[in-house]
């Protein structure tokens, strides 16, 4: 008689969930050319058509937590490209424990609500799925 052993490795947060209503492109109504794309736990933020940040997100209880994995260096006197946390620290010549790296790559939690084609973050940042609402 043989014995069958099954194993499973799970990585990530087992309780992590995403709100499928977020999926798609959301245009910031007060910032021409600014939009965020949410896709099943991944996000990308654009300003004036330039990808400035990407990462992962989870949702629950009316909160969204975004965890940046890459930041565009253009605003930080670096090449206009995406940098991981370690790449950014190295390019800036600072420790990954420096204030700037911690600030840029730390998870950010916001309240959010969705009503039809309108997304509101922290009760003040309003996004629309309708690009024509982009001011």
Image (spheres, rainbow, N blue to C red):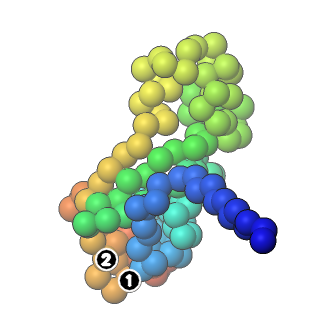
Q: Are marks 1 and 2 in contact (CB under 8 Å)?
A: no
Q: Is residue 61 above or below residue 70?
A: below
Mark 2, secondary structure of its residue: strand
Q: Where, quadrant-wise, is the C terminus in this rendering? A: bottom left
Q: Residues within 10 Å of mark 1 (few under 14, many from 20)?
A: few
Q: Is residue 78 visible?
A: no
Q: Nearer the viewer, residue 114 or 95?
A: 95
Residue drawn 58% across and 56% down?
10
Q: Residues within 10 Å of mark 2 (few under 14, many from 20)?
A: some
Q: Is residue 106 visible?
A: yes
Cα–Cα span, label 1 and label 2: 7 Å
**Mark 1 vs mark 2: in front:** 2
Label for residue 117?
1
Residue drawn 63% across and 55% down?
9
- Residue 41: percent from left, percent from top: 52, 64
Residue drawn 37% across and 46% down?
108
Q: Where, quadrant-wise, is the N terminus in this rendering? A: bottom right
Q: Which residue is mark 2?
A: 114
Q: Residue furthest front?
A: 1
Residue drawn 31% across and 65% down?
60
Q: Residue furthest right?
A: 2
């Amino acid at each position: 008689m043989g014995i069958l052993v099954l194993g499973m490795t799970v990585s990530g947060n087992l309780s992590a969930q995403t709100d499928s209503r977020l999926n798609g492109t959301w245009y910031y109504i007060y910032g021409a050319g600014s939009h965020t794309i949410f896709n099943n736990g991944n996000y990308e933020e654009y300003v004036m058509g330039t990808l400035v940040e990407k990462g992962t997100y989870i949702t629950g209880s009316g909160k969204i937590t975004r965890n940046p994995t890459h930041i565009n260096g253009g605003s930080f006197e670096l090449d206009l490209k995406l940098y991981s946390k370690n790449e950014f620290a190295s390019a800036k010549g600072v420790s990954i424990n420096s204030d700037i790296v911690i600030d840029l790559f730390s998870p950010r939690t916001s309240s959010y609500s969705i009503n039809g084609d309108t997304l509101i973050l922290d009760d003040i940042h309003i996004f629309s799925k309708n690009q024509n609402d982009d001011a």
